[in-house]
Image: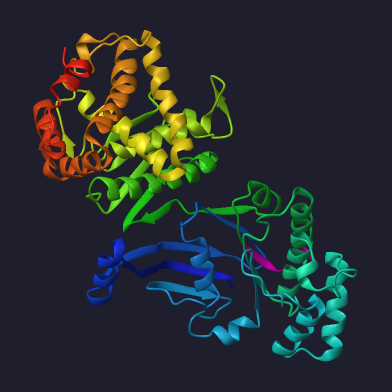
Amino acid sequence: MAAIEVNNLQKTFRSKRKSGGMRGTLRSLIKPDYQAIEAVRGLSFSMESGELLGFIGPNGAGKSTTIKILTGILFPSGGEAKVLGYIPWDQRRELAYHIGTVFGQRPQLWYHLPAIDTFYLFGKIYEIEDRDIKQRIGFLSEAFELNELLETPVRKLSLGQRMRCEVAASLLHKPKLLLLDEPSIGLDVVAKQHIRDTIRTMSQVENVGVLLTSHDAGDLEALCKRVIIKTSITTNGVIVSIYTPASYQLGADASLEVASEALRVFSERFSPYPYSELDLVTTPTLALGIEYPGIIAITEQIMVPDGNINNTPVSNYLESTVAHEVGHQWFYNMVGNDQLNDPWLDESLTQYATLQYYFDRYGATGAQGFRNNLENRWSMVDMAEIPIGLPVREYTDNEYSAIVYGRGGLFLEALRDRMGQKAFDDFLKDYSISYSWDITSVDKFKALAEKHCNCKLEPLFQEWVYP
C-alpha cells in the first residue's frame, strides 16, 4: 500500500484586500473586498512505504500548505488524498497515531520545560505504557545524542540541539511516516549533517517513510532518492509557473520569486495584470530574455544563479532580466507601440519599471545598483547625448543598448524629477490604463504627461528624445 496518494489536490484561501488610509479601513468594514489565493493547484503524486521523498519549490508554492493538508490540519478545496489509507481531514485522530511531523518554524516542545517533560507528555497523549515510553526515550536519546540535553529547559538549547529534540519527539510513538517541513532551517553545517544522518538511520532501522520539504539542496541530496518539484506560485490571484529542466531548479525558484514580486509591484503601480497565468520558460536563446504576451523566455545561461559572468554574479543578471521581462507585460503587451520606430516607448519604460521594482523591493540602496547599471550602459558610448527617440535602424549595436536601455531609463528618471514623484506616478498609472490594448506614440505619451504635471515638457523632450 502506498504511504501517500494525492490526486488533483487543491487549496484556495480567501483573503481580504484593503486600501490604505482610514477611508480604506472603513470601506473594508462596510463592503469588504476579497480575493482568492490559490495555494495548491492540481497537485498529484504518490509515495511508497519507507520512501524518502523530497518536495521542493519556491516560497509561496504551497509546500507547507500541502503538508498541513496531509496531516489533517487543513481541509482541501478540492481533490483527493490518502495517507496510510486514511483521509487526513476526516480521520485526523486515527492518522495522528501513525505519523510524525516537524515544522521547522513551529516548535512542538514546551519552551520553558526540559525536553524530557514534553516527551513524557507525548507518551501520555499517544497512550504509550510508562515502561515503553521510558525505553523509547532511552533509544532515541542514544540515536540523537540527547542524554546531556534532556533535562535542560528547551529555551536554553541551541537551535541545532532543539531541532534534534523536535525530530526525536516526532518519532516517540514509532510512526510509519514522518513529514518534515524545512527541519534544517537556520542550522549550521554541522547541525544539519547531524540531523540528516539521524533521519537516514531511523528510516533504515524502522522503515519510516519521510516526506521532506527544504530549500537546502544538501538535505535533498543526502536523504532523498526522488524529488517532487513544485513549479508554480500564486500572486494577486495570478498563477506564475516555470518550465525548466530539473538541473536548473535553483534558478527556477529564484525566477519564480522575482516574477511574483515584480508582478505585485507593477500591478500596484501601473494597472492589474490582465491574465490569470504568467509562464516562464527556459530556452537556449542568446538573448538574456524575450517577452511575449503572458510568456517570458529566459536563457539557460543565467539559470545557475551561483555562478559569475564578467565578474558579476549570475543572480544579478537573473533578477534584472526576469523583472525586466515581467515589466514588458505592461509596456509592449498591454500598452502597444511601434517597436521599430519608437523602441524607447517599451524598452526604456521597462527599464524604468525595473528600477522601480528594485526600489520597492530593496529601497533606495538596492535601486542604486540597477541605476548604476543604466549609467554603465550609457557609458558604452561615452555618455554621448544621442536621442533615445531614433528608429532601431539608425543605431549601431552598441548605441542601441547604450541609448535605449541605458540613457532611456535615465530619461524617465529625469522626467519624474521634472514632473514630481506623485504626478509622475499618477501619470504612469493613467498611461497604463488609458492606452491598454491600444497603440501609443511619443506625442500621446508627452501630452498625457503634460496634463498630469500641468507643465511644458518640450525642452526636456528636445534634450533627451527628439532627433
The question of residue 63 being in magenta is answered with: no
The residue depicted at 45 percent of the width and 31 percent of the height is 368
Is 72 situated above or below 241? below
Q: Inspect this view and state whether residue 81 appears.
A: yes
- Quadrant for residue 323, please give it: top left
Residue under the image location 21 percent in, 16 percent down: 463
The spot of residue 231 in percent (x, y) is 45, 51
Q: Quadrant of residue 370?
A: top left
Region rendered in magenta: 204-211
Residue at 37% x, 68% y is 12
Going by the image, does 281 lie left or right of 250? left
Q: Nearer the viewer, residue 219 or 23?
A: 23
- Check the picture and name the quadrant holding the N terminus: bottom right
29 or 114: nearer the viewer: 29
Quadrant where the image shows the C terminus: top left
Number of marks in picture: 0
Q: In the image, residue 51 lies at what x, y percent?
A: 65, 62
Q: Nearer the viewer, residue 112 or 260?
A: 112
The percent coordinates of residue 330 (x first, y second) are 24, 40
Q: Is residue 296 visible?
A: no
Horizontally, is 443 left or right of 316 in the view? left
Q: Relative to 463, say whether 79 is above or below.
A: below
**Can residue 206 be found in the magenta stretch?**
yes
Whether residue 110 sits left or right of residue 263 in the image: it is right
Q: Position of residue 106 (x, y in %)?
A: 62, 69
